[in-house]
Image (tube, rainbow, N blue to C red):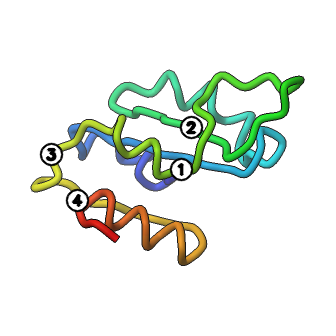
Amino acid sequence: MLTLIGEINKFRKVVLCYGAKTPDDVVYKRLFPEWNKIQGLEILRSVDKCPPEAAWDGTTGVVTCLLDKCKVDINNSVAIVCGPPIMMKFSHSQACGYEI
């Protein structure tokens, strides 16, 4: 991700679909405000579960729920997926329009 941000001008658009189990599990929390200022970078965030007392302004649900919000030309896009095997399986199938 940091490499893509460093070379953002080579792309029309970069979309980060970021997921964590809870708001407390979010890595790079301190970087998101700065990343939100980068032109050409869209950040979509979700957590699986959000305790009522947590301050969370993202989506609640597994990270694949963000793919429906991701507006890209699938025929002219590259996906870089990082996570556990089950998440990668469902992300790939959903992004490519396959049924599991």
Q: In this picture, is 81 found above or below 9?
A: below
Q: Are marks 2 and 3 in contact (CB under 8 Å)?
A: no
Query: What residue is pinned by disc 4?
Result: 97
Mark 2 and mark 4: span between their CA atoms? 21 Å
Question: Residue 54: which numbered mark, if any?
Answer: none
**Dot in front, 1 or 2:** 1
* Tag 1 residue: 63
Q: Residue furthest front?
A: 100
Residue at figure coordinates x 23%, y 62% from the top left: 96
What is the secondary structure assignment of the residue under circle 1? Answer: helix
Q: Residues within 10 Å of mark 4 (few under 14, many from 20)?
A: few
Q: CA distance from mark 1 to mark 2?
A: 8 Å
Question: Which amino acid, by three-letter code, is at mark 1?
Answer: Val
Measure the C-alpha gap from mark 2 to mark 3: 20 Å
Q: CA distance from mark 3 to mark 4?
A: 13 Å
- The secondary structure type at the circle numbered 4 is loop
Other-residue count near label 2 (Cα within 10 Å), few / some / many at <14 / 14–19 / ≥20: many
The foreground one among 8 and 76 is 76
- Tell me the CA gap for discs 1 and 3: 20 Å
Amino acid type of disc 4? Gly
Picture residue at 54% right of the left edge, 77% below the top: 85
Mark 4 or 1, nearer chain start: 1
Task: Please tell me whether mark 3 or mark 4 is closer to you in this view.
Answer: 4
Q: Please name whichever residue, 90 or 74, is drawn nearer the observer in this view of the structure.
A: 90
Crowd rating for badge 3 (residues with CA inside 10 Å; few <14, some 14–19, many 20+): few
For mark 2, what is the residue? 45
